[in-house]
Image: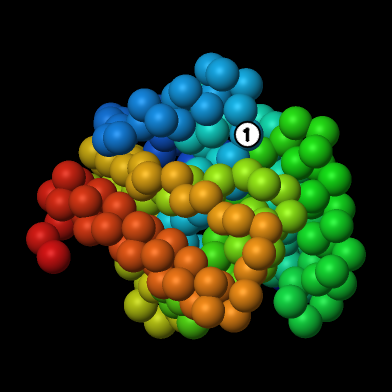
Amino acid sequence: MASDLLNSLAPSLAAGYIRLVGTASHWEYEDFEPVREFFEGGRRAIFAFWHNRFILMPYFYRHRQGRSRIAVIVSPSRDGRLVEDFIGRFGFRTVRGSSSRDGEKAMISLVRLLRQDWNAAVTPDGPRGPRYRVQDGILTLAAISGLPIVPVSCSASLRLVFRGSWDHFRLPLPGSRIRMVFGQPLAVGKNLEERTRDNLREELRRRLRRADRRAETLAGHRR
């Protein structure tokens, strides 16, 4: 009973905590102009960031940029339900599914939302990893929708790193210097042969890791 109560409260508590972090921290962005042009020009994109950095993204898009038309695929697992409740408090739209369960159905639902002027947010290595390895789903989504993939990374100067988790999850602390870095958008064509997929996976990984390194440096973490 106590665990059920905690699970029901967890998304609300997590959202409140992230709002506290967001308002009590100093934000700076690097290479944001291409993304700003996407927003101001009414264009859409698929935003990609690693699983261990996702916790700040809903706050950034909702409260720093005033955007809420972001759609996300979340796992149909119990943990996925908690994530769904958490990001739903920032106005995000969720689609339930994973590579092992209802994956095709979830992809079709997400593509429909993209065609209705929604953006998408994807963790290329989620929900189970391996950490920092790009999976095929984001490339398939980009190929079908025709939207570019925008790599995003962030780092907080004050944080806890949970090295016991598969993704080395990073929890930012209030009063941080939060630095967000945007990579060059990656265009994905319609023809995704195996060799092309391999090259695109590696290129997206490189762009994300480059953004990671820059964000870490700007936030004061030595590499």
Relative to the observer, which residue lies in front, 149 or 98? 149
Q: For the residue labelled by badge 1, is the local secondary structure a helix, a strand or a loop?
A: loop
Above or below: residue 218 compared with residue 77: above
Query: Mark 1 = which residue?
Result: 44
On screen, residue 137 versus residue 19, left or right, reads right
- Rendered residue at 28%/41% (across/down): 179
Residue 105 in the image, given as x and y percentages of width and height: 89, 64
Amino acid type, mark 1: Arg
Above or below: residue 179 compared with residue 82: above
On screen, residue 179 versus residue 172, left or right, reads left
Relative to the observer, which residue lies in front, 96 or 177? 96
Residue 127 in the image, given as x and y percentages of width and height: 61, 71
Let me know if residue 15 appears in the view: no
- Rendered residue at 34%/65% (across/down): 206
Residue 157 in the image, given as x and y percentages of width and height: 22, 48
Relative to the observer, which residue lies in front, 197 or 102? 197
Density class for disc 1 (Cα within 10 Å; few <14, some 14-19, many ≥20) is many
Corner quadrant of residue 223: bottom left
Residue 195 in the image, given as x and y percentages of width and height: 53, 79
Let me know if residue 44 appears in the view: yes
- Rendered residue at 67%/58% (across/down): 190
Corner quadrant of residue 189: bottom right
Corner quadrant of residue 62: top right
- Rendered residue at 47%/51% (across/down): 186
Count of numbered badges drawn on the protein: 1
